[in-house]
Image (spheres, grey):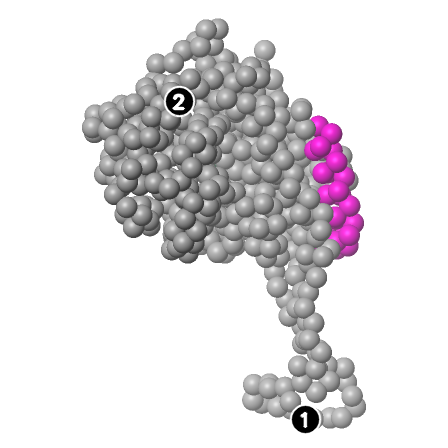
Amino acid sequence: MAKSLYHWIKGEKLHQQSGKFGDVFDPATGDVVSRVPFGGVEEIAAAINAATDALPNWAATPPIQRARVMFRFKALIEEHMDDIAVLVSSEHGKTLEDARGSITRGLEVVEFACGIPHLLKGEFTEQVGTNVDSYSLRQPVGVCAGITPFNFPAMIPLWMFPLAIACGNTFVLKPSEKDPSCPLFLAQLLHEAGAPAGVLNVINGDKDAVATLLTDPGIDAVSFVGSTPIAKHVYATAAASGKRVQALGGAKNHMVVMPDADLEQATDALMGAAYGSAGERCMAVSVAVAVGSSADPLIERLAPRVRNLKIGPYSDLEAEMGPVITKEALARIRGLVDAGVTDGAELVVDGRDVSLQGYENGFFLGGCLFDKVLPEMSVYKEEIFGPVLSVVRVPDYESALQLVKDNPFGNGTAIFTRDGDAARDFSNRANIGMVGVNVPIPVPVAYHSFGGWKDSMFGASNTHGMDGVRFYTRLKTVTSRWPSGIRQGADFSIPTLK
Ligand code: NAD
């Protein structure tokens, strides 16, 4: 029997009696495991009102007390790590180990938010003029909304709401309708940690709920992570409604393999980065750029490894890769592989027809490996978001760098080499937000900030780290003088302090 999910509003479950509902699948079996309500006008208004009502008291709560809630939240996430991992894996399909890793990356943001009293410290200058002082402080923005994708149901919500809330804001989260159970559970844990009712609300839904959050005057800031077309739309719509916006989009991440690279290390890196989580990561490597003589030995090493990938449901602890998220995603990925073949790329490993005994209705696809992919092919141009790696051969380093620079996406990239000069030049000249040197998935830790360039991000602020603190606060600067008894009279020109 499919479970009935709910919204989380004002510290309570809100079960929706009528309106629209969506199916949530176990991608390994293809079974519907729960029904998620799609919030309508009434439910969304209730979530925004709850956040609005909770704002004044929460914003006035001293940062040290907000930090203490974060400390307790951190402890509760650690205590429930295995339960959260099962919620992630059972609706997303990724392996339990991978789910735990992603929760840990989210937990690191909670740990960063525990330091909020220090992070919110302002600046003070004595004597900007005679007997005049100036100080700058950071105050909450107000009610913030977060709209998150399916591929990291724990980590990406955790990039957003802990820091926003630690900064004194209240929050309305609209998680992906494909795997909402984990964010609902996280909201319950935050409440248990001591966050007052209404500080975090979760409204489930699809694009209709998003449309309201982007335009409702009750929302002051919007954080979005998802695909590029939607990120662009979210950025334009929310900004036109006067909100501050950070909108992170899709990716096509290239890993450059230089002829002097340690090829065993590069192969291991490509296996994990291309096929881990079935390629459903915005930092997945989907293009290997083989420079000069590295191409043949790289393909030789990759092909048997891809052929022998262990594919299975999350309950199979030996599995290296699970299914993709939906039947539609499976059909779309297969279609792109078909197009690659039609376009003339060489399909070295074909995982299109993999079927698992006992899981025939699951959304499984084997690893696919293309060689001799050209930039004009759709398999190169599209973000596949599946277990498909394309090898593009280039003659030299400059051509590899040019390929990276010409790609419209700019989330992550990596170079594998033993040449420090090449690595330094690449880090300097690649027009990409996150660069790895012999590190395939260079996801910044929580106290640095995460974000891409070009079509991978719209808006000026990355997530978490100090960019996150800046995004979730408004800067105020106070210039103050205490009356000294000396009257100076009215001054009709712009004040300059002497
Ligand atoms: P998606 O864009 O389909 O959905 C993201 C969110 O937007 C969901 O909450 C969804 O309900 C909502 N949404 C969907 N269609 C909408 C519409 N027309 N109008 C308004 N809202 C809409 O993305 P997804 O399939 O859930 O996630 C995969 C995508 O996210 C990939 O492109 C991936 O690269 C990207 N992603 C990017 C990052 C990053 O940090 N840059 C991280 C993770 C995922």
Position above or below: 461 against 159: below
Question: Could you say where residue 271 lies in the image, as x and y percent from the top left?
Answer: 44, 29
Question: Could you say where residue 396 lies in the image, as x and y percent from the top left?
Answer: 28, 46
Position above or below: 476 against 259: below
Give the labeled residue for mark 1.
489
Identity of the residue drawn at 49% across and 15% down: 312
Q: Nearer the viewer, mark 2 or mark 1?
A: 2
Question: Could you say where residue 368 lies in the image, as x and y percent from the top left?
Answer: 35, 23
- Magenta residues? 55-80
Look at the image and say whether residue 214 sits in the magenta stretch: no
Look at the image and say whether residue 63 sits in the magenta stretch: yes
Identity of the residue drawn at 64% across and 48% down: 163
Q: Amino acid at mark 1?
A: Gly
Position above or below: 290 against 332: below
Magenta segment, prevailing SS (helix, strand or loop): helix
Front one among 379 and 325: 379
Neighbours of disc 1 within 10 Å: few (<14), some (14-19), many (20+): few
Residue 303 image-quadrant placement: top left
